Amino acid sequence: MKFSDNLIRWYNQHKRKLPWRNTNDAYKIWMSEVILQQTRVEQGLGYYERIIARYPDIFRMADAKEEDLLKLWQGLGYYTRARNMLSAAQEIVTDYAGIFPQSFDEIIKIKGIGKYTAAAILSFAYDLPYPVMDGNVKRVLSRYFCLTGDIANAATEKELENKLQKVFDKKRPSDFNQAIMEFGALHCKADNPGCANCVVKDGCKAFLKNKVAELPVKSKRTKVKTRYFYYLVPWLKVHSQKYTFLQKREAEDIWKHLFQFPLIETAKKLSWNRLAVTPEFKNFLKNDHYKVLEISDVYFHKLSHQTICAVFVQLEVFSGLHDEKLNKVPIQNLKKYPTSRLIEKYLIEHVFADT
């Protein structure tokens, strides 16, 4: 177990002080793992602390309102994680009396909990012998065993799992899992890994063959789609009160259940003059009585597989709007609604700055 011994020794000397490492509370461990999916520790730490402060246990989380949780999650991205978290908490409270199952076959049935998260909860909370496999672990193993297969392929995934089982420390599963993930995050990094002072370099086949920089092999990313969003920001003044209108995104798409201004999505970039004569814009208003207040520059928002090109058009309207599903919101209440980071940025720059 020289590989395991060296990694755990390294981990005990170099590990970061993180709040979820000082507990065996399955709820807090689960929370950290969900937040850290697709998210760097530096970004996720503040969210973890704020969410735990608001929902300190599984029962409080199960009672959360989705809009309140999404508001806390705002800016973190991949909002499906938050929605699944709420569903899972309710399931654990209802079906398991608020206690996370200690069976792999049971825990993996819970919404949003996959193989990696299940192994992390079971090993970190209960010290059960389940190895974790995240991106950091794949990178360490690919280099240590000099695996040249594409890590996105099922065959390579299976080979990685077999290699992980060979080096996995069943007597110290929690320590091993924490160590190999931290080693990949801090030492065996994607760029500029610390090979010169690596504690496992004597057995690292990629290091011995001078192939560290070539591994792991990854498929080329899918083509990024460009989408054109035109947000209509209507302002209605009633006596001395100023209102705008928001709609909730319901489609199976990005930012589901977040709020947005009325949206017209187009296949290509349009000028305001062309947008104003589209059927979508004409259907937006009950009449043609409006005034254009401001048209923003383009806001670019990059996601994993798509880029949003957004323009915000502020309008003064003088009556209600055609869509009955719109929420009429006093300007002072805008901050209460969970929105995408894109809309939040626009509000900070063009709305909240003036209020």
Image: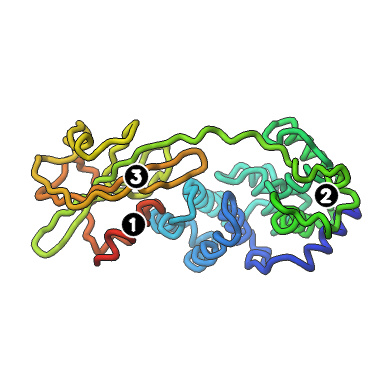
Q: Earlier in the sequence, mark 1 or mark 3?
A: 3
Distance in Å between CA atoms under marks 1 and 3: 20 Å
Where residue 310 is drawn, which disc sits there?
A: 3
- Can you give x and y, in whole percent of width and height, for residue 242 in the image? 17, 60
Local SS, label 1: loop
In the rendered view, does 287 fall on the left or right side of 259? left
What amino acid is labelled 2 in the image? Phe
Q: How is the image coloured?
A: rainbow
Front-most of residues 301 and 73 = 301
User: For the C terminus, which image quadrant?
Assistant: bottom left
Residue at horizontal 30%, vertical 45%?
A: 311
**Disc 3 residue type (three-letter):** Ala
> Residue 337 bears which disc, if any?
1
- The three-letter amino acid code for the residue at tag 1 is Tyr
| Mark 1 vs 2: CB contact within 8 A | no
Q: Earlier in the sequence, mark 1 or mark 2?
A: 2
User: First in sequence: mark 2 or mark 3?
Assistant: 2
Q: Is residue 204 above or below residue 54?
A: above
Q: Nearer the viewer, residue 67 or 332?
A: 332
Q: Position of residue 155 (x, y in %)?
A: 74, 30
Element carrying mark 2: loop
What's the residue at 83%, 60% (across, down)? 197
- Please give the name of the residue rendered at 75% of the width and 45% of the height, measured from the top-left corner: 213
Residue 168 numbered tag? 2
Q: Quadrant of residue 236?
A: bottom left
Q: Is residue 41 visible?
A: yes
* Viewer-nearest of discs 2 and 3: 3
> Which residue is depicted at the point 37% across and 56% down?
345
Q: CA distance from mark 1 to mark 2?
A: 46 Å
Q: Which quadrant of the figure has residue 20? A: bottom right
